[in-house]
Image: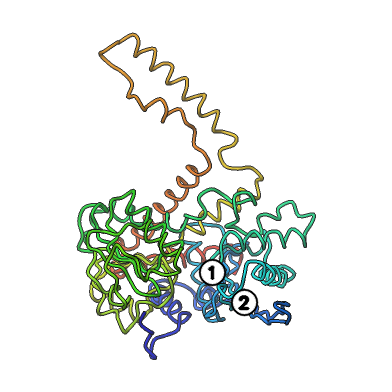
Amino acid sequence: MCAAPLNEPTFRQSVDLMFNRAAALMDLPPGLEQKIRVCNATYTVRFGVRLRGQIHTFTGYRAVHSEHMEPVKGGIRYSAAVDQDEVEALAALMTYKCALVEAPFGGSKGGLCIDPREYDEHELELITRRFAYELIKRDLINPSQNVPAPDMGTGEREMAWIADQFARMNTTDINARACVTGKPLNAGGIAGRVEATGRGVQYALREFFRHPEDVAKAELSGGLDGKRVIVQGLGNVGYHAARFLSEEDGALITGIIERDGALYDPKGLDVGRVHEWLVRHGGITGYPDANSVADGAAVLAAECDILIPAALEGVINLSNAHDIQAKLILEAANGPITAGADDILRTRGKVIIPDLYANAGGVTVSYFEWVKNLSHIRFGRMQRRQEEARHQLVVDELQRLDLMLGDAWSLTPSFKEKYLRGADELELVRSGLDDTMRIAYQSMREVWHGRDDVTDLRTAGFIVAIDRVARSYRAKGL
């Protein structure tokens, strides 16, 4: 992938530049604008773990951007590239993301400077538990103050270790499981969390394509069926987004870009088979059923309808923004387009569905998991059978009419089975996520179409989010 030019702003500076562009169109008191922009606090921890006969020292971070609502929320990533600038930028994005989708959290983010591939499972558990210990004892992991989640390089396994570490240190806290989200189902997790960010990407695109006026702005027409999609990064987010879009919406995944190159097929790639190969071989090199391209950056600029950068920040920057041919870009990753590249793409008329909205599926379902942990009952447990019983009354009455009317009228064969079945937790989670993504898009769209000085969805999203954060601070008396 292309390296960002030397004159490119940092990730943190890019977030601030995008914030400033929106704030300049708002009537905020200077002091309040500054309060919303700055990161409240960043904690840096250096801790030792005895591994392989000697002590290894690790550096970790937890940034808290805004406490206008508590607890604050944000993932923990494991990456050798993690630094303070990155976690503060991600924490800021979390603030605006939570505000946009109306999740009642402030923004936070954490990171551990480590390549998890260099350690076995037992070693990673020791490292994770020690990192969690350092954060827990300072209330930087707490159900009512700071609630992490998975991010790049972490998943259900690491969240289960963190939750268990918190429970060991807080043996009388009945809400201990709510200290972290993204846990396995058997450890207090929620159905649909693993797929949540990718599912949110799908719902975001579906909502965009419900509005012909918006689709026309991207010089597209119709629905998602048959649209050519290139996905950069087939990790958890990119894989689920690509799979759902191809299997459920009829989109053609024509390109998949990974760290060791790219695959391209104008007739569409089999996402499941590519993912299986990637998991088995650690890369896409050697995949037999598609054209292989050594230079992944070239495929990033290939002709397509929709481009979904779903891996790292800054992959579209000043060096390649002029080459992007996609008509619609959806930011499934955090900060994949730099501030400079964003200016270029907007000038070229490209429509961008921004990260603070497009990848909010993860934090939305994390919110549902947090609520589930605090309520100590799974969604659907109380009402599902009662719904089925009420639906049975309707079916019985329809069947009575069916017998009376004979051949003149009859029930559709699958109606009874579909109508009788009450919603389980997964269906309720997907329903809540779909509703959240629809309403959040409509709030951005109202600003995008309702103001002459707002010409893009990113600025509209920031305006909505900043306004909600400002209202929270004003309600606190600030």
Viewer-closest of 82 and 254: 254
Q: Residue at x 47, y 31 (%)?
A: 421
Tell me the kind of residue under disc 2.
Tyr
The tag on residue 153 is 1
Viewer-closest of 39 and 291: 291
Tell me where residue 377 appears, x and y as whole percent.
64, 42
What element does badge 2 sit on?
Answer: strand
Colouring: rainbow
Q: Is residue 258 left or right of residue 94?
A: left
Q: Which residue is mark 2?
A: 61
Rounded to the nearest whole Å, what is the CA distance between mark 2 and mark 1? 15 Å
Tell me where residue 285 appears, x and y as whole percent.
37, 71
Q: Is residue 95 left or right of residue 309?
A: right
The quadrant in which residue 335 appears is bottom left
The tag on residue 408 is none
Q: Residue at x 43, y 48 (%)?
A: 435
Q: Is residue 462 visible?
A: no
434 w.r.t. 157: above or below: above
Tell me the kind of residue under disc 1.
Gly
Q: Is residue 307 visible?
A: yes
